[in-house]
Image: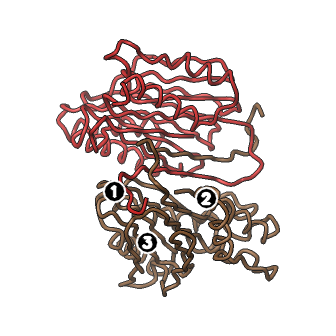
Chain colours: A red, B brown
Amino acid sequence: MAVAKINKYAVSESGDTLEIVERPNGGVSVVMADGQTSGRGAKAISTMVVRKVISLLADGVRDGAAARAASDYLYTDRDGKVTACLNILSVDLQTGTIVITRNNPTPIFLAHKEQVECITSDSVSIGTNRNIRPSITEFPLESGITIVMYTDGIKFAGDRTGQPLNICTLLESMLEEEEPTAQEIADNILNQAIRLDNNRPNDDMTVVALRSTPTEVDQIRRMTVRLPVANLPGD
Amino acid sequence: MAVAKINKYAVSESGDTLEIVERPNGGVSVVMADGQTSGRGAKAISTMVVRKVISLLADGVRDGAAARAASDYLYTDRDGKVTACLNILSVDLQTGTIVITRNNPTPIFLAHKEQVECITSDSVSIGTNRNIRPSITEFPLESGITIVMYTDGIKFAGDRTGQPLNICTLLESMLEEEEPTAQEIADNILNQAIRLDNNRPNDDMTVVALRSTPTEVDQIRRMTVRLPVANLPGD
């Protein structure tokens, strides 16, 4: 599972928040939220939503219930005046499934081997109503699955120049070529989106890619974080 | 920043828990706890400690205060009868520093360029006493810093065969050769430790490596998680 993330051009705080958490009964979940607008206000909202979901998942609450709780929480806290998009992508080793939870009109791409399909079912963002339900897709965890999800900064990349990003085609061509890693897929999509915005992202952009590949030989879990720091002394 | 982690041989739940969290004022923290013994009981303790610390850091609480709070919390919850080792390693972009918080007798290695030193100051694990204080080391975030920290499964690797791991020498030789990535350093140390335990780790093992390298050209944040799954269907 890999993430690539960049802030809106010349804005230091990203309205996109993403955290990865270990599931208490085995597996891992990535929780991604995009708060209304960008900058500090959006960051506060998306952070609040992600923290609520992470904390519920860590207690063993199921993904759909966690998304509903986050919606009610945001609705109560902000009087229904603020909305956020929320996605949860889980590898659940207890059920042996992948679970995709969407409160986000932005589509998610799902590939079995090289066959790419797009999950575009209706899905509303959280916080503006009581009884908001997530759209949930669950299927067995098998080898050869690729999932790509992203925030609307990617969806609307190139909108100003009239050249939107065709992620389906891009993903198909990547999967046809050689076995790309999840990080290569996320990086490639983010880089294309940045280029379409003339190297100055019009919005915060986050891409998450998941790949299930044949069992590795070792039983080692690995995690890497790369954080760019402007003007590191001693360069 | 990279993590490599493996469970004790033939034990499905690791007593080591590790989470990485974004700091609210910029930067990232990795929180690592090792509960007494191994298996389910140890997992519950280390998870409780890590979640408490993560939640405080996300509220903007400073690392030392978060460690003390986690100690008092564990002491209260378990009547002072259970202990856990706790490390927090933070890249704090607000202060421009690296902060190492230790409640763990296991040493931490710190290198400026190829000069490796070892932080071995006295440090007690949390939970068994009121007023337990962490040992804190803070220094400017510069280019060319390498930090390695790990749980006692690594420290005691090879103990049964009388061949302990000399991490200082190992790290020096890695840094002298070519520019290893944080993941290569973590993997290399973990693999050596597993080998010294005859490929059957005597305890849960976790290694964290941090490297500050010259500024990358892009401003993209990246995160990768690799989770081994036994018997993935469709392999």
Mark 1–mark 3 distance (CA, rounded to whole Å)? 17 Å
Give me the chain letter of mark 2: B
Q: Determine if marks 1 and 3 fall on one subunit.
A: yes
Q: Chain of mark 1?
A: B
* Co-location on one chain, circles 3 and 2: yes
Q: In front: A39, or A162? A: A162
Residue on which disc 1 sits: B58
> How far across and how far down the image is residue B66, in percent?
35, 69
Of all chains, the one bearing label 3 is B
Q: Secondary structure at mark 3?
A: strand
Quadrant containing the C terminus of chain A is: bottom left
Q: Residues within 10 Å of mark 2 (few under 14, many from 20)?
A: few
Q: Residue A185 location, x and y as percent? A: 57, 31
**Measuring 80% from the left and 64% from the top, which residue is drawn there?**
B199
Percent position (x, y) of residue B113?
53, 69
Would you place residue B199 above or below residue B165 in this image?
above
Residue located 55% across and 80% down the image: B118
Q: Dividing the picture into quarters, in which one does residue B173 lie?
A: bottom right
Q: Residue furthest front?
A: A235
Compare marks 3 and 2 and give the one earlier in the sequence: 3
Q: Say whether residue A170 is left or right of residue A61.
A: right
Q: Secondary structure at mark 1?
A: helix
Q: Which residue is mark 3?
A: B100
Side of B76 relative to B94 (left or right) = right
Which circle, 3 or 2, is nearer the viewer? Answer: 2
Pointer 3 local density, CA inside 10 Å: few below 14, some 14–19, many at least 20: many
Q: Amino acid at mark 3?
A: Ile
Q: Quadrant of residue B68?
A: bottom left
**Which residue is the site of mark 2?**
B179
**Badge 1 or badge 3: first in the primary sequence:** 1
Answer yes or no: do the residues labelled 1 and 3 have beta carbons within 8 Å?
no
> What secondary structure is found at the residue carrying circle 2?
loop
